[in-house]
Amino acid sequence: MDETFKNVVFLAITGFVAYHGLTYRDEEGNTDTVRLLFGCIALLFFFRVFLVDVLGVDIF
């Protein structure tokens, strides 16, 4: 498979996980700590792949 396609699929999946994890609320309006944790981790991976692999920004 093409590297660009892999990056787009990865960004879509991690973007969805990050969005869901950071915006999820239960019936009472409370957030879940585990979902927030994994949402933050997914967001970090999303930005890393987007900046380094897609945009070509050199971090170091």
Image (cartoon, rainbow, N blue to C red):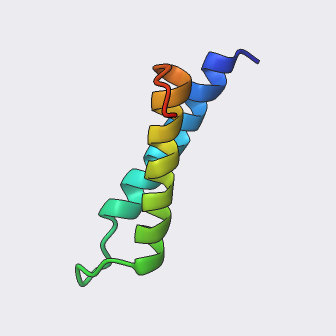
Count of number-bearing discs: 0
Q: Report the residue that reaches farthest toward the right.
A: 1
Q: Nearer the viewer, residue 5 or 58?
A: 58
Q: Nearer the viewer, residue 49 or 15?
A: 49
Up the image or down, 5 lies above or below 20; here it is above
| Point 46% across, 69% down: residue | 37
Up the image or down, 27 lies above or below 20; here it is below
- For the N terminus, the quadrant is top right
Q: Position of residue 12 (x, y in %)?
A: 50, 36
| Point 30% across, 61% down: residue | 23
Q: Report the residue that reaches farthest toward the left.
A: 29
| Point 45% across, 47% down: residue | 16
Q: Position of residue 59 (x, y in %)?
A: 48, 33
Q: Nearer the viewer, residue 6 or 27?
A: 6
Residue 10 location, quadrant: top right
Q: Nearer the viewer, residue 6 or 51?
A: 51
Q: Position of residue 22 (x, y in %)?
A: 34, 61
Up the image or down, 11 lies above or below 34; here it is above
Q: Report the residue that reaches farthest toward the front.
A: 60
Q: Position of residue 48 (x, y in %)?
A: 50, 39
| Point 39% across, 78% down: residue | 32
Residue 25 location, quadrant: bottom left
